[in-house]
Image (cartoon, rainbow, N blue to C red):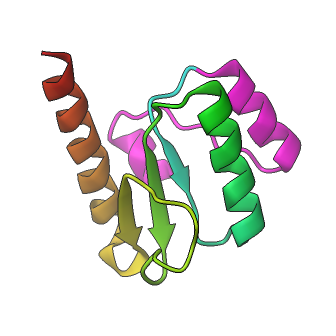
């Protein structure tokens, strides 16, 4: 996530479920990035909370493979093989969509 900070993004990286819940409740973020290291149940729990608190918050899924096998339907999927540049590109696409939706 240092790569994103170097690009000017503010990054919150919860290290526990309690920290993730607190971050979701406090808000102040524009997008959520889910890691492929999360189990299906934990990823679904995060998405359920997001839908409850911020139903329009975009979700980017980092994955070591396609995300099709999960119930979660992210706005963007970035494969691990795409590297940090793939994540940056997905963030830029989401920002671009958001800007055009506002106009």
Residue that appears at 45% across and 31% down: 56
Quadrant of the snapshot with the C terminus = top left
Q: Is residue 15 magenta?
A: yes
Q: Which residue is at the front of the view, 4 or 57?
A: 57
Q: Which residue is at the front of the view, 61 or 53?
A: 53
Q: Position of residue 54 (x, y in %)?
A: 57, 27
Residue that appears at 46% across and 77% down: 68
Q: Which residue is at the front of the view, 30 or 3?
A: 30
Q: Position of residue 64 (x, y in %)?
A: 48, 81
Residue that appears at 20% across and 36% down: 97
Image height of 90 relative to 80, above or below = above
Which quarter of the figure has residue 43?
bottom right
Image height of 20 relative to 33, above or below = above
Q: Is residue 80 magenta?
A: no
Q: Which residue is at the front of the view, 5 or 71?
A: 71
Furthest residue in direction right, as rendered: 18
Q: Position of residue 47 (x, y in %)?
A: 63, 48
For residue 68, side relative to residue 91 (left or right):
right
Residue that appears at 71% across and 30% down: 23
Magenta part of the chain? 1-27
């Amino acid at each position: 996530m240092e790569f994103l900070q170097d690009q000017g993004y503010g990054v919150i990286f919860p290290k526990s479920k309690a920290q993730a819940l607190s971050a979701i409740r406090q808000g102040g973020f524009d997008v959520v990035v889910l890691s492929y290291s999360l189990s299906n149940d934990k990823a679904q729990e995060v998405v359920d909370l997001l839908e409850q608190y911020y139903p329009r918050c975009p979700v980017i899924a980092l994955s070591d493979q396609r995300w099709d096998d999960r119930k979660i339907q992210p706005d963007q999927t970035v494969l691990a093989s795409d590297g940090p540049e793939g994540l940056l590109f997905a963030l830029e696409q989401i920002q671009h969509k958001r800007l055009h939706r506002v106009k």
